[in-house]
Image: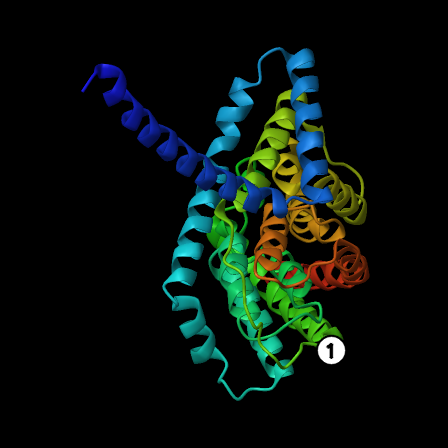
C-alpha cells in the first residue's frame, strides 16, 4: 500500500475527529448564546467602555485589577460550590428539611426568604443567593420569588462584617472592632429582616406547582456575568484613585452611598467611598447593602440571582425588582437608623 493510500484513511479519521470536536464546542457556545440577553450585553458594553476610559486616563489599571481580584475569585468559588451542592441534591434535601413537602406555597416562600436572610447575615450574601434560588426554583414557580430572594439577601447583608465584602472595605478604614460592629448591628438587622420578609411574603404570589423541567445552571453564563463586573469595578477603582468623600447628614450620606452603589455596583462604590465618623460609616454600610436594590446591576448577588433564576426557567423582572426596592428602601433605612440609634444609646 502506498503512503498516499495510507494517508487517506488517517486524514478521514482526523477530519471526523475535528468535526466532532467542533460540534461539541458549537453546542456549548450555542447554549451560552441562547442565554445572552440585553442586560448582559449592556453590562459587557459598559465594562469595555470603562476599561478603555480607565486605560486612557490612568494609563495603568493593573493595580486596580489586582486589588479587586480576591473578592471576585472568592465569589467564583462560592458559585462553583453552590452548583456542586445543587448537582449532588444537597440543596433539595435542605429544602425538604426546612419546609415540609406538604407546605403551602406561601409557607414555602416565607421559609425560603427567612433562610435567605439568615444566610446573608450569618454567612455571606452570595452564599445565600446560591443556596436559595435552587431551593425555591425546585419547588415553586414565579410570583416574584427570585426578585424577593435578591432583595432579602441584599437588605440582610449587614449583620457581620463578613456578610458583605463592601462592609469589609468600609471597615478597613475605621477603628470599629468586629465586636463593636455586631453590638450595633444585631438589633437593626433583626428588625429590618422581619420587616423585609413580612412585606415581601405579603406581596408574593408563589405558584403551587414545581417546575416541570428545570434547566441545568449554565456555568459559562454565570462566569460571563461575573467577568464584566470585575472589569468595570477595577476600571472605576483605577479612575477614582483618591476616592469620593461622604459628607452632610446621615440621610444625605445614606442616599449618596445608595445611589452610587446602584449606579456603579456596590463593590467598586465601596472601594472609592471615604466615610467619616461612626454615623458616616454606618450610612455607607447600609447604603451599600440596601442601595443595590434600586437596580439589578447594583450588586453581584443580584446579577447572580437573576442568572441562576433564568437558567432554571424561573422569571426575574428587572423592573419589578427596582420597583420593590424603591418601595422598601426608605422603610428599611428609617428602621435601621432608628434601631442603630437605640443600640448606640444602650451601649
Quarter of the image for residue 323 reads bottom right
Residue at image point 61% right, 36% down: 229
Q: Name the residue under label 1.
A: 202
Location of the C terminus (image quadrant): bottom right
Q: In this view, does 121 lie above or below 213?
A: above
Vertical arrangement, residue 27 with respect to residue 210, above or below: above
Q: Can residue 256 be seen in this view?
A: yes
Q: Which residue is drawn at 62% across and 22% down?
A: 238
Q: Up-down: is 280 above or below 205?
A: above
Q: Nearer the viewer, residue 287 or 200?
A: 200
Q: Dot 1, how many residues are within 10 Å of its Cα: few (below 14), some (14-19), or many (20+)?
A: few
User: Residue 295, position in %: x, y?
Assistant: 74, 49
Quick check: 57 left or right of 108? Answer: right
Picture layout, residue 128 above or below residue 15? below
Element under disc 1:
helix
Q: Quadrant of residue 325?
A: bottom right
* Side (left or right) of 142 relative to 108: right
The image position of residue 236, as x and y in percent, is 66, 27
Q: Which residue occupies 45% across, 79% down?
A: 96
27 and 198: which is toward the camera? 27
Q: Position of residue 271 (x, y in %)?
A: 61, 33
User: Is residue 271 visible to the viewer in this orientation of the structure?
Assistant: no
Q: How is the image coloured?
A: rainbow
Rendering quarter of residue 60: top right
**Residue lying furthest front:** 1
As rendered, which of 29 and 164 lies closer to the eye? Answer: 29
Quadrant assignment for the N terminus: top left
Q: Where is residue 116 in the image (x, y as percent from the top left)?
A: 55, 65
Residue at 71% in and 43% down: 39
Q: Nearer the viewer, residue 127 or 221?
A: 221
Name, please, the residue furthest toward the left.
1
Amino acid at each position: 500500500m502506498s503512503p498516499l493510500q495510507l494517508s487517506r484513511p488517517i486524514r478521514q479519521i482526523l477530519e471526523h475527529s475535528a468535526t466532532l470536536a467542533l460540534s461539541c464546542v458549537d453546542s456549548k457556545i450555542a447554549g451560552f448564546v441562547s442565554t445572552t440577553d440585553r442586560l448582559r450585553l449592556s453590562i459587557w458594553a459598559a465594562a469595555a467602555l470603562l476599561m478603555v476610559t480607565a486605560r486612557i486616563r490612568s494609563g495603568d489599571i493593573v493595580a486596580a485589577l489586582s486589588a479587586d481580584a480576591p473578592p471576585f475569585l472568592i465569589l467564583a468559588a462560592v458559585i462553583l460550590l453552590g452548583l456542586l451542592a445543587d448537582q449532588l441534591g444537597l440543596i433539595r434535601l435542605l429544602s425538604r428539611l426546612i419546609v415540609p413537602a406538604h407546605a403551602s406555597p406561601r409557607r414555602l416562600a416565607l421559609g425560603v426568604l427567612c433562610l435567605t436572610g439568615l444566610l446573608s447575615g450569618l454567612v455571606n450574601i452570595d452564599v445565600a443567593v446560591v443556596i436559595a434560588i435552587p431551593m425555591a426554583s425546585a419547588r415553586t414557580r414565579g410570583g416574584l420569588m427570585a426578585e424577593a430572594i435578591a432583595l432579602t439577601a441584599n437588605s440582610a447583608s449587614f449583620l457581620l462584617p463578613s456578610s458583605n465584602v463592601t462592609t469589609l472595605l468600609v471597615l478597613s478604614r475605621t477603628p470599629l472592632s468586629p465586636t463593636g460592629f455586631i453590638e450595633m448591628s444585631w438589633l437593626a438587622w433583626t428588625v429590618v429582616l422581619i420587616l423585609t420578609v413580612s412585606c415581601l411574603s405579603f406581596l408574593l404570589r408563589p405558584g403551587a406547582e414545581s417546575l416541570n423541567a428545570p434547566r441545568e445552571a449554565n456555568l459559562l453564563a454565570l462566569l460571563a456575568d461575573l467577568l464584566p463586573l470585575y472589569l468595570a469595578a477595577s476600571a472605576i477603582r483605577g479612575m477614582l484613585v483618591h476616592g469620593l468623600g461622604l459628607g452632610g447628614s446621615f440621610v444625605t450620606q445614606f442616599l449618596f452611598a445608595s445611589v452610587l452603589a446602584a449606579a456603579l455596583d456596590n463593590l467598586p462604590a465601596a472601594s472609592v467611598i471615604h466615610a467619616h465618623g461612626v454615623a458616616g460609616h454606618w450610612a455607607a454600610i447600609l447604603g451599600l447593602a440596601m442601595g443595590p436594590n434600586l437596580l439589578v446591576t447594583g450588586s453581584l448577588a443580584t446579577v447572580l440571582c437573576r442568572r441562576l433564576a433564568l437558567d432554571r426557567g424561573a422569571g426575574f423582572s428587572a423592573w419589578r425588582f427596582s420597583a420593590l426596592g424603591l418601595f422598601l428602601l426608605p422603610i428599611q433605612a428609617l428602621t435601621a437608623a432608628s434601631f442603630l440609634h437605640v443600640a448606640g444609646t444602650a451601649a
